[in-house]
Image: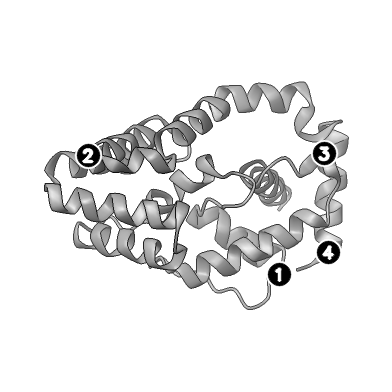
Amino acid sequence: MNKVKLKEAENNFIIRFPGGFSNPQMLELAKKHKVEKMKKIAQDSFAIGQFESAANIVDSMGKIVSQSSLISLFEKPKFRELVKVLSDSEKEHLAHGLKEFLHGDQAYGFGLMTGLLYEYKLAKWPLLTVYPIYYRPSVEVFVKPTTVKGIIEYFELAGLKYNSNPTFEFYKAFREQIMQMKQEVHASLQVDNAAFCGFLMMTLENHLHKD
C-alpha cells in the first residue's frame, strides 16, 4: 500500500471532518444510510439459530438487498424476482451458503452462494458481500466494483487484481489489505470496515474532482 497517500487522505479527512466518524456530518450520513438499522436486521436475521428456516433466511436476504443503500437500484428488483422463483432446495442451498460464510467455512459458503447466483446471472459482488458487512462490520468487507478498483489503483495495493467474477480468494486478500490499511490510520477512522471503505471512497471522489 502507498502509506503516504493513505496518510494524506487521513489528514484531509480529519481536517474536513474533525473527530472522524464521530463528526456530526458523518453521524448524519450514517443515519441517512440507515447503518445501525441495517446492522440490527442482519444480526437478528442471521444469528446461528435463525438458520433452521431456509425460507426465512432467503426472505431476510431479500429484505437486506431491498433496503440497503449499498445495492444499486438496478440489482434490487432482480434479486427480488430471484427470491420469488427459487425452489425450496435452492433456498436451502443459498441459506446454507450464507450460514457457512457467517458461521462456518467461509470459502465453502462463498462458493455455494456464488454457484447458485451464477445460474441466475446474479453472481455479483454486492449481492454476495452486503450481508456479512452488516452482520460483522468490523471484520468483513463490502465489495463495490468501482470503489474497489479505485482503492486498489490509487493506494497501490500490491498483489490484488480485481475480477468481476467473485472469488473467495480475492475477497480474502482484499479484506486483509483493508484491515492492514485500517491499522495505519487514526483511531477515529477505525470504526468498522464499511465506514473505513466509505472514507477511502470519499478520498477517491475528491481525487477525481481535483483531476
Q: Amino acid at mark 3?
A: Ser
For the residues labelled 3 and 4, say whether their Cβ atoms are less than 8 Å apart. Answer: no
Q: Earlier in the sequence, mark 4 or mark 1?
A: 4
Identify the image quadrant of residue 158: bottom right
Q: Earlier in the sequence, mark 2 or mark 4?
A: 4
Q: Nearer the viewer, residue 71 or 16?
A: 71
Q: Amino acid at mark 1?
A: Glu
Q: Which mark is residue 3?
A: 4
Q: Nearer the viewer, residue 68 or 75?
A: 68
Q: Residue at x 61, y 59 (%)?
A: 150
Secondary structure of residue under mark 4: helix
User: What separation in Å lies between label 3 and label 2 (alpha carbons)?
Assistant: 39 Å
Q: Earlier in the sequence, mark 3 or mark 1?
A: 1
Q: Nearer the viewer, mark 1 or mark 2?
A: 2
User: What separation in Å lies between label 2 and label 4 (alpha carbons)?
Assistant: 46 Å
Q: Earlier in the sequence, mark 1 or mark 2?
A: 2
Q: Earlier in the sequence, mark 3 or mark 2?
A: 2
Above or below residue 143? Residue 39 is above
For the residues labelled 1 and 2, say whether their Cβ atoms are less than 8 Å apart. Answer: no
Side of 193 relative to 72 (left or right)? right
Mark 2 lies on residue: 55
Q: Which mark is residue 188?
A: 3
| Percent x, y of residue 199 | 70, 44
Q: Amino acid at mark 2?
A: Ala
